[in-house]
Amino acid sequence: MTLNVAHRGDPSSAPESTLPAFAAAMALGVDMVEFDVHQLADGALAVMHDATVDRCTDGSGALAEMALDEVRALDAGSWFADEFAGVQVPTMAEALAALPEPVLLNIHLKTVPDGSGEFERAVLAEIGDAGAGPRALIVHHDLPTLDRLRALAPELRYCLLPDTPDGFEYIARAAVEGFSVLQPGRGMMSAEFCQAVHDAEMVANVFYADDAETMEQYISWGIDGILTNCPALLAQVLAEMRSNR
């Protein structure tokens, strides 16, 4: 059955990509939680979608130019609701600790590193320290970064994001590069695409669906997972479709 992949935790009930959002997703019993990782100026790993802190905190500036103590001093909750005032931007270690077994992890790396391997080793160290390797899917748009990660930790699962709007070209490129997990965009979705994914012995988690009609359509096509900003709604849709079988 299709996986319920909570995008940035549960951003419908708590500020996205924060510990309260992850707790809300866990309370729903989702199958997988997606979160984004950036490397800061001091080498620390922080969880936030954007490359800047402007949208989701009371600060401004690029994450890559800030140290961890600067980022931790920001309020990452008030923008969403007063009750979340003082919520901090989490570190990668905190995110992993907040997402224990059995939930799966969709770890979207946003930093494009310098090729030294420092970023890749830091990410893998956090995953190893948390014992999260068997549950982790590491996602990136940069093939050289993924190649370095695969060389360091070939036992983990990896996903190369598409660089083409054509779903069938995406399948072909992933196959050539040795990836078996895909994360297609909405524009790629069709029954034929889902069948081609499975014919190629791959799995795909689509980004994204936030309304019941689209969720139902993707599920009927056999998509393996749906990233959603509305995990409670997806849980309801999945439960209803199971009961109607």
Image (cartoon, rainbow, N blue to C red):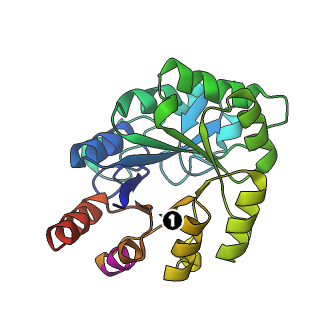
Q: Is residue 69 visible?
A: no
Foreground of the two, 11 or 218: 218
Image quarter of the N terminus? bottom left
Q: Position of residue 5 (x, y in %)?
A: 40, 54
Q: Is residue 133 above or below residue 183?
A: above
Q: Is residue 180 above or below residue 2?
A: above
- What residue is shown at x 68% (from left), y 64% (from top)? 162
- As drawn, the residue found furthest toward the left would be 243
Foreground of the two, 31 or 243: 243
**53 is within the stretch colored magenta:** no
Foreground of the two, 75 or 16: 16
Image quarter of the C terminus? bottom left
Secondary structure at badge 1 equals strand
Q: Quadrant of residue 222?
A: bottom left
- What residue is shown at x 62% (from left), y 53% (from top)? 180
Q: Position of residue 75 (x, y in %)?
A: 43, 39
Q: Is residue 39 above or below residue 193?
A: above
Q: Magenta residues?
A: 213-217
| Kind of residue at badge 1 | Phe
Q: Is residue 111 visible?
A: yes
Q: Position of residue 235 (x, y in %)?
A: 25, 60
Looking at the image, residue 151 sits to the left or right of residue 35; the answer is right
- The main secondary structure of the magenta stretch is helix
Q: Position of residue 38 (x, y in %)?
A: 63, 39
| Label 1 neighbour load within 10 Å: few <14, some 14-19, many 20+ | many
Query: Residue beneath label 1, please?
Result: 207
Foreground of the two, 242 or 84: 242
